């Protein structure tokens, strides 16, 4: 091994250490901001090492360097623009889009290398390359098309309801058989590009038929699973072209994505196979205020809510997707500051799947410098609801629905926040619309619950103003 090769190998090792350290720091909202630049630095080192190896090999044409530079400028510019312009509520869609790009790119690497080897006279495709190529193409293809469908469902371009048509399962099974059968043929050392393209086509269509029947409520879990697929596909691409950097990076992404998927599935008390089978979640549905409820609704004004919370000893705020959609985290923090100035003990109850991704609420509240000590996870905060004078629910729906405690409902078995155990409950919501599970929230008809119908941003601002007037 030459000097440059040794340096490149050491650079990949440094990059791997940076990736691991970054992932570890991202485990906590308190250290996540440190973890992101460390992981970014690791990727810069890995890319630089790869470019150095290409330059040292001396077989890269001028055209190839121009293409690489163009890709860096276009891809880097697009990524920078999207990172700056994306709304926090659209982060899951962006993650899904990045999954598609990663999985698709990995598959293209394998396809290009297979075509290159098949075109070289006297060069046999080894079983190792054939297996890695087939797995890369299957996983990458499924990830590419499946991630695009998932992003479309979350963005509202595709209905959040499960999409099922006659013969769908038969088609999906046939596609799986084609993919497996074609791959098995490639494992024999075949250089048949037509068979490879058949596997590619089957994988792309399989990704669509796999995700379409899954409801909107399960999309965050599906995105996490596809993220793990992306990592595996990248690792397989590393085996195809003998790149240690791709193998290490892909393995880490695959492992972290798998862990996240398992955690999310456990938070919803559902198995991953059950989620993939589909049939849960019907998307948001908007109905008129007061409609669709099975009991009486008690309305509150901003003054009523302000009085209840200003003279309470303990208030627990429950943020949900409605807060994220309205970008109301700053108003939420301002209300908490006013209450704390009156001696009220304020904390935040964070459900693992509140919003659309784990950590969604933590990130939003961290943006406005809510102390980390006030952010309490579900298991820690649930016992505290019994002693809370007021639970303020801001745009959270399914994660507070007592129907989850009863059998035979779409939410049955899903762990929820015990909001109904508080002495008084205030819910800020635009309407009586359903959450992703598509059922009424029984919390809204609880005699202890007062409904304040308003956009989260506007509603919190009105309550804060009323609370300040009381202070004056």
Image (spheres, rainbow, N blue to C red):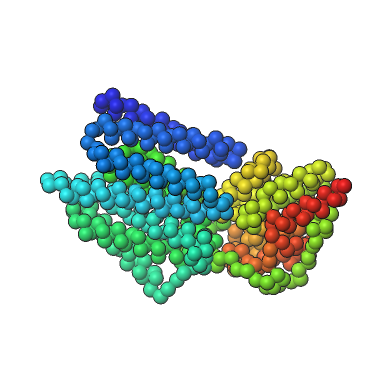
Tell me which corner region of the image, top left, top right, bottom left or bottom right, holds residue 371.
top right
The quarter of the picture where the N terminus appears is top left
Q: Position of residue 132 (x, y in %)?
A: 29, 48
Residue 438 appears in view: yes
Residue 280 appears in view: no
Residue that appears at 35% across and 66% down? 173
Q: Position of residue 318 (x, y in %)?
A: 69, 53
Residue that appears at 32% across and 64% down? 175
In depth, the one of 195 and 326 nearer the eye is: 326
Give the answer, above or below, for where 30 lies relative to 459.
above
Q: Position of residue 135 (x, y in %)?
A: 31, 51
Answer left or right for 234 relative to 163.
Answer: left
Q: Position of residue 63 (x, y in %)?
A: 26, 42
Residue that appears at 74% across and 46% down? 334
Answer left or right for 26 relative to 373.
Answer: left
Answer left or right for 188 relative to 284.
Answer: left
Please give the count of numbered marks on the rendered protein: 0
Residue that appears at 38% across and 35% down? 46
In the rendered image, the residue lying farthest to the left is 122
């Amino acid at each position: 091994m030459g000097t440059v090769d040794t340096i490149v190998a050491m650079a990949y090792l440094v990059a791997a250490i940076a990736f691991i350290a970054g992932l570890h720091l991202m485990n906590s909202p308190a250290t996540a901001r440190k973890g992101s630049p460390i992981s970014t630095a690791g990727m810069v080192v890995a890319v630089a090492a790869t470019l150095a190896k290409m330059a040292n090999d001396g077989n890269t044409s001028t055209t190839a360097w121009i293409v690489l530079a163009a890709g860096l400028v276009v891809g880097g510019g697009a990524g920078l623009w999207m990172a700056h312009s994306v709304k926090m509520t659209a982060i899951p869609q962006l993650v899904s889009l990045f999954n598609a790009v990663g999985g698709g790119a990995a598959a293209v690497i394998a396809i290009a290398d297979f075509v290159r080897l098949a075109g070289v006279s006297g060069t046999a495709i080894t079983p190792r390359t054939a297996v890695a190529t087939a797995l890369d193409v299957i996983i990458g293809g499924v990830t590419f098309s499946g991630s695009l469908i998932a992003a479309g469902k979350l963005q509202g371009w595709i209905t959040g309801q499960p999409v099922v048509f006659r013969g769908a399962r038969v088609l999906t099974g046939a596609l799986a058989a084609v993919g497996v059968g074609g791959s098995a043929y490639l494992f024999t050392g075949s250089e048949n590009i037509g068979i490879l393209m058949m596997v590619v086509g089957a994988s792309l269509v399989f990704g669509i038929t796999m995700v379409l029947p899954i409801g909107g409520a399960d999309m965050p879990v599906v995105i996490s699973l596809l993220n793990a697929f992306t990592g595996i596909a990248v690792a397989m691409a590393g085996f195809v072209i003998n790149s240690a950097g791709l193998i290490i990076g892909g393995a880490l992404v695959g492992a972290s994505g798998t862990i996240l998927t398992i955690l999310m599935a456990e938070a919803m008390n559902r198995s991953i196979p059950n989620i993939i089978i589909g049939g849960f979640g019907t998307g948001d549905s908007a109905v008129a205020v007061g409609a669709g409820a099975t009991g009486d609704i008690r309305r509150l004004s901003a003054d009523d809510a302000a009085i209840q919370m200003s003279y309470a000893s303990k208030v627990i705020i429950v943020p949900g997707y409605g807060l994220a959609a309205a970008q109301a985290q700053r108003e939420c923090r301002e209300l908490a500051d006013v209450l704390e100035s009156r001696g009220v003990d304020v904390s935040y109850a964070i459900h693992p799947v509140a919003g659309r991704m784990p950590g969604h609420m933590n990130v939003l509240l961290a943006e406005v410098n809510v102390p980390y000590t006030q952010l309490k996870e579900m298991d820690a905060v649930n016992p505290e609801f019994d002693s809370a004078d007021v639970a303020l629910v801001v745009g959270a729906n399914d994660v507070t629905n007592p129907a989850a405690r009863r059998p035979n409902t779409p939410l049955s078995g899903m762990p929820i926040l015990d909001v109904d155990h508080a002495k008084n409950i205030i819910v800020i919501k635009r309407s009586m619309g359903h959450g992703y599970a598509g059922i009424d929230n029984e919390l809204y008809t609880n005699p202890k619950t007062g409904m304040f119908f308003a956009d989260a941003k506007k509603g919190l601002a009105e309550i804060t103003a009323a609370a300040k007037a009381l202070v004056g």
